[in-house]
């Protein structure tokens, strides 16, 4: 039986990836590095803002505006007024509660972003005290650090953890951590999640998958 389910946040619990990648594409384009929504999804989904800055500055050949992250988060948080939970995920959390299976959250987002998103969809109380951010570790996804940190904090062995991820970077991080991982292809090309143990397309299928893990 799975000892701990670790959820990614954006795109798994909250439907924020479309908002976030649209805003990021706009800001990078304004900074002189034209990006489309599809390209930001391809290059940055699942990663940290620090990683995004490092990659784009290498391409641009000069620093991005110092306030880009602040402007990104301000636009993003303004858009969270309309944020929704991923369809069907609340039933998944209810199922875990009923089965007595522990769960937590490990996201590349900042603590402020995570808490703002969870508050918007009414999930903050369900994860309070079990929220882990890339801010907590030296290396974010695809390094295993964040997932290993979450497992250690929850006092569960990595081999007993199951990660729910929607990005190739997150899947790679879970694999590197020695954890089982299910890839949610809600917005991601399933082929890009091929390193996951299982790829699923609908949250309604997840409770049975977890029970069988």
Image (tube, helix red, strand yellow):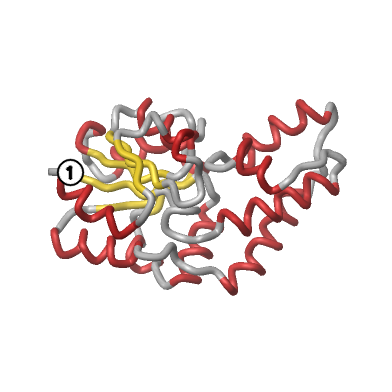
Percent across and percent down for residue 67 are 78, 50
Residue at point 44% right, 66% down?
Answer: 85
- The N terminus sits in image quarter: top left
141 lies above or below 113: above
Percent across and percent down for residue 156 are 21, 40
Nearer to the camera, 97 or 145: 97
Nearer to the camera, 107 or 35: 35
* SS label for mark 1: loop
Q: Give the quadrant of residue 197.
A: top left
- The C terminus sits in image quarter: top left
55 lies above or below 46: above
Question: Circle 1: is it few (<14), some (14-19), or many (20+) Cα within 10 Å?
Answer: some
Nearer to the camera, 25 or 80: 25
Q: Please give left or right for residue 208 compared with residue 131 in the image.
A: left
Residue at point 24% right, 66% down?
Answer: 94
- Give the residue number, with chain letter if any, for mark 1: 2
Residue at point 73% right, 48% down?
Answer: 25
Disc tally is: 1
Residue at point 48% right, 34% down?
Answer: 192
Q: Please give left or right for residue 77 compared with residue 11 in the image.
A: right
Nearer to the camera, 89 or 70: 89
Q: Please give left or right for residue 54 compared with residue 15 in the image.
A: right
Percent across and percent down for residue 168 are 48, 35
Percent across and percent down for residue 161 are 25, 39
Q: Give the quadrant of residue 97.
A: bottom left
């Amino acid at each position: 039986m799975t000892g701990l389910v670790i959820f990614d946040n954006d795109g798994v619990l909250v439907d924020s990836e479309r908002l976030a990648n649209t805003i990021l594409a706009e800001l990078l384009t304004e900074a002189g590095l034209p990006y489309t929504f599809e390209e930001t999804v391809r290059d940055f989904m699942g990663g940290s803002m620090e990683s995004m800055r490092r990659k784009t500055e290498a391409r641009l050949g000069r620093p991005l505006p110092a306030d880009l992250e602040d402007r990104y988060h301000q636009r993003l948080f303004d858009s969270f007024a309309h944020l929704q939970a991923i369809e069907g995920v609340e039933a998944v959390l209810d199922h875990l509660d009923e089965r007595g299976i522990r769960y937590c959250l490990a996201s590349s987002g900042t603590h402020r972003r995570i808490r703002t998103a969870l508050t918007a969809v009414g999930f903050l109380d369900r994860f309070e005290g079990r929220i882990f951010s890339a801010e907590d570790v030296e290396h974010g996804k695809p390094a295993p650090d964040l997932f290993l940190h979450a497992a250690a904090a929850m006092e569960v062995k990595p081999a007993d953890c199951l990660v729910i991820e929607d990005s190739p970077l997150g899947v790679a991080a879970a694999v590197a951590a020695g954890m089982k991982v299910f890839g949610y292809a809600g917005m991601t090309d399933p082929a890009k999640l091929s390193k996951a143990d299982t790829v699923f397309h609908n949250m309604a299928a997840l409770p049975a998958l977890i029970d069988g893990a």
